[in-house]
Image: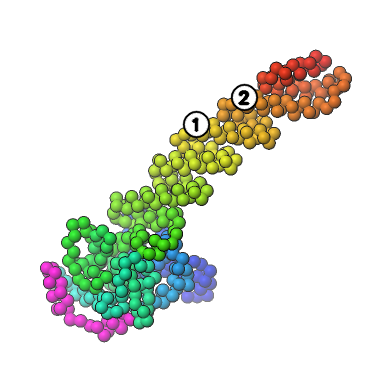
Amino acid sequence: MNFLKKTYYFFSDYTGPAERRVAKFFSKIRENQEVEEIKPQLLELIQSNVIAINLWSEYKYRQYKYLKKSERKQLYVNVSSIVMDFKNHLVSGRQNSQPVLEEIQALSLDGKIFADKIDRLMYLKSIMSFLAPEGGRYVYRKSSTFGALLKDPTKEPMVGDCNQIVTLYVYLYSLKFDVSELQLRTFPGHVALHFNGVDIEATAGRFMHYKFKDQSLLPIQELISLNLLDTSDEYFKTHKVSAEALLEAARVGYVLSSQRQVVAHNLAVAYNNAVVELMNGGSYQKALDYAKQSGNRKLITTAGHNGALYFMQQEQFTKALDFAAYSNQKEKLRLAIYQSKGAYYFDKGDYHTAIKAFENSGDSGAVKSCYAGLFNNERKKLGKISTVEDIKANQKTIHNMAIYAKNSGSQNLISYVDDLKKHL
């Protein structure tokens, strides 16, 4: 890496090109995209470095504070140690294919289907033996973080749940073969690998032949959406993550998932939580933006209504009116905002602005009070009136007073001006 690139990554949020590439991919995802549209690039990213995808998405979308830049750098160093240890295992742990085929046949599966895939099958078997719990390198633990898995296995055990160990399997497989050859076997609360007809239970390092009623077989790229939408680990449960970050994760997960009917509910909940959290924090513009993006009419009207009330209280009347347009009580809100605006400018003595506001609110009494205020302002201009000449010298002011008195509807003010006008 040349000096300029080193300088860039020193000051950037990325540990290196792999994370930057992942971030760039995620930043371009839009909700209206079809999964087939982005599938080639996603598969390319998984092939290139699925570890970087997982670490960056956990840092960015789950806001795991422990995954600061320096920690992620160390985790990538640990990954290199894992790969080195695995390569040593490949050299020292060569196996005969016949026992492996017999193991598969014992599951009532035809071993002949692997005739042209023996090299891949044996490579997967090597990964399985390398990461099998009895080998001491890996320990299964439900609800753990990805960082706990990425340890130097020559120094301490790697700890992780099904999503995380499957991710590591995929990474090790990608070092030699095309990841699109793999699939995911899922059923409620669990994910395993699938290769050419046989399931691979990564948490145990064993071949399986699952037959659950509600199981599914998904393409390998589905792993990214599964990881993004997984909320099971303990760190996630015990640390506050902003609803806005969770929404971003749900949006990306929705686009990347081929099971959109399943994840659509998660996305709707994420939108609702983000809008509520943003409103509670006073970020009404962003809340309304997200509400509109959600397409949820109730969420839009709530954000509009609450935002209108908030900005009215903040005396930002133009903004309040903009928000009121989205409320299901827009006319009632509009009148209240203009009434509040009129009162605000009346107190400031800006009677002309107050008149316009009160006229829009339909408060004719307040409009008359404004004209009375304008009348009093003009009367102060008269100064001391002692002679007819003094009255004539203030002819323009008296003319204005006559107009304001008439508009105020006050007979006393009208009579006062009429007495002055007799001397003009």
Q: Nearer the viewer, mark 2 or mark 1?
A: 2
Residues 105 and 121: in front is 105
> If you read the primary sequence from the N terminus, does the residue marked by circle 2 or circle 1 appear first?
1
Where is residue 18? Give x, y as percent: 42, 69
Return the residue nearer the eye: 391 or 33: 391
The reply to whether the magenta stretch includes residue 395 is no
* Main secondary structure type of the part rendered in magenta: helix
Residue annotated with mark 1: 331
Name which residue lies at 42% across and 43% down: 299
**Residue 90 is a magenta residue:** yes
- Tell me which segment is drawn in magenta: 85-110
User: How packed is label 1: few (under 14 Cα within 10 Å), some, or many (20 or more)?
Assistant: few
Residue at 34 percent of width and 65 percent of height = 143
Q: Secondary structure at mark 2?
A: helix
* Residue type, mark 1 in image: Glu
Horizontal placement of 24 versus 8: left or right? left
Q: Residues within 10 Å of mark 2 (few under 14, many from 20)?
A: few
Q: CA distance from mark 2 to mark 1?
A: 20 Å
Report which residue position mark 2 lands on: 365
Q: Position of residue 332 (x, y in %)?
A: 50, 32
Please say if 377 is above or below 168.
above
Whether residue 416 is visible: yes
> What coloring was used for the rendering?
rainbow
**Mark 2: amino acid:** Gly
- SS type, badge 1: helix
The percent position of residue 256, horizontal first and vertical second, equals 34, 57
Expressed as whole percent of the image width and height from the top left, the position of residue 128 reads 25, 75
Residue at point 21%, 67% (across, down)? 199
Q: Is residue 22 visible?
A: no
Quarter of image, res 28: bottom left
